[in-house]
Image (tube, grey):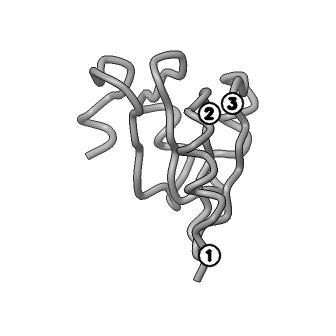
Amino acid sequence: MTFRVLVADNLAAEAVACLEAHPAIELWDKAGISAEELEGCIHEVDALLVRSRTQVDASLIAKSSRLSLVGRAGIGIDNIDLDAAT
């Protein structure tokens, strides 16, 4: 089974390489993706990795029954709606 991971913001090259090397991960490196584009493809991924640029709110999360993980690279989680993510 493949776990589809979308990277919405710039991550360290080492982190991207590690994800790409994992045989069970299909990586969608879309760093810099617009909010509209993200809303259009969120239903196709299992995990979303962000930094501080991307806002992960209840509306975005509700667009995907497949999404099971939201990860934040960096400090803080003020751009993620924790109630909706839970």
Foreground tag (1 vs 3): 1
SS category of the residue bearing label 2: loop
* Residue type at numbered disc 2: Ala
Tag 1 near tag 2, CB within 8 Å: no
Where residue 6 sits in the image (x, y, percent)?
Answer: 62, 47
Where residue 48 sits in the image (x, y, percent)?
Answer: 52, 45
Q: Residue at x 57, y 56 (%)?
A: 19
Q: Residue at x 47, y 25 (%)?
A: 51
Q: Quadrant of the N terminus?
A: bottom right
Q: Residue furthest bottom?
A: 1
* Residue situated in front as seen by the camera: 34 or 31: 31
Task: Read off the residue under disc 2.
Answer: 8
Q: CA distance from mark 1 to mark 3?
A: 21 Å
* Residue situated in front as seen by the camera: 25 or 41: 25
Q: Residue furthest front?
A: 14
Foreground tag (1 vs 2): 1
Q: Residue at x 69, y 30 (%)?
A: 31
Q: Is residue 27 above or below residue 63?
A: below
Q: CA distance from mark 3 to mark 2?
A: 5 Å
Where residue 77 sits in the image (x, y, percent)?
Answer: 29, 24
Task: Read off the residue under disc 3.
Answer: 31
Q: Residue at x 63, y 65 (%)?
A: 21
Near mark 1 (Cα within 10 A), the count class, few <14, some 14-19 or many ≥20, is few
* Residue type at numbered disc 3: Ala
* Residue situated in front as seen by the camera: 76 or 44: 76
Task: Read off the residue under disc 1.
Answer: 23
Q: Is residue 76 above or below residue 48?
A: above
Tag 3 near tag 2, CB within 8 Å: yes
Where residue 63 sits in the image (x, y, percent)?
Answer: 56, 44
* Residue type at numbered disc 1: Pro
